[in-house]
Image (tube, rainbow, N blue to C red):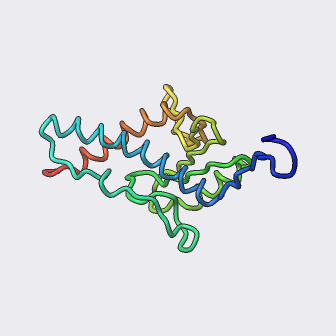
Amino acid sequence: MDGFGPMAATPVKKKINVRNKGASGEREAINIIKERMRLVEARLADTGLHVKAASNDVMRNSLQSRSGGYDAHGIPIIALEIKRDEAMSLDAMWAQAQRQAKNRELPVLMWRRNKGKWAIRTYGALTSIAGAPMMWVVCDLALSDFLDYYERLYETYLRMNADGN
C-alpha cells in the first residue's frame, strides 16, 4: 500500500539559501551586461578601432559584504548594485546603490523579484529645448531600455579611450 501510513512520501519544501540565490542573481545580471558590452566591442572591432575589451575584466565582487563596494567590478561608467529578493524595499536598495557609487560613477540598481523581470533604477537627465539647465532625476527603466542606453554610453567610453585618442 504505497503512499499510505507513516512511511508515505510527503513533499519536502526545499530550503532556499538566500546567499546562493543572491549570488546566482548577481551572476545572471552581470552576464546580461557583459553580453551587451561584447556586442559593442565586436561592432567597434569590425570598424578597425582598437579598443580595450573591458568585458573581459568584469567580475562579481565576492568580497562585497566584507569589504563593501558594489556587486560587479570592471563595468565602466556605472556602479552596479544587484538585488533579487521578495521582501525588498526599493527605496532602501536605491539608497545602497547610491552609497556604493564612487569616483563619479553612475549608480545603477538592477533588481527583480523571484520569477520576475529585471528592472533598473538609475539617474537620467532632463533637458529643456528652451536652454534651461539640465536636471538629474531618478528613472525606473525596463532592462531593454537600460541596455540600449548603456550600449551608447559604453561605445562612447570605448571611442574616447581607443588607441590613438
Q: Position of residue 27 (x, y in %)?
A: 48, 51
Q: Position of residue 119 (x, y in %)?
A: 58, 38
Quadrant of the drawing holding the N terminus:
top right
Q: Quadrant location of residue 23?
A: bottom right
Q: Residue furthest top?
A: 129
Left or right of 118 on screen, residue 51: left
Who is closer to the viewer here, 84 or 129? 84
- At a point 52% along the width and 52% down the height, the residue shown is 26
Q: Residue furthest front?
A: 1
Q: Quadrant location of residue 114?
A: top right
Left or right of 161 on screen, residue 82: right
- 132 is higher (above) or lower (below) than 161: above
- At a point 56% along the width and 45% down the height, the residue shown is 110
Q: Position of residue 15 (x, y in %)?
A: 71, 55
Q: Position of residue 70 (x, y in %)?
A: 52, 60
Q: Residue furthest right?
A: 5
- At a point 63% along the width and 37% down the height, the residue shown is 115
Q: Residue furthest bottom?
A: 66
Who is closer to the viewer here, 82 or 28? 28
Q: Quadrant location of residue 41?
A: top left
Q: How many marks?
A: 0
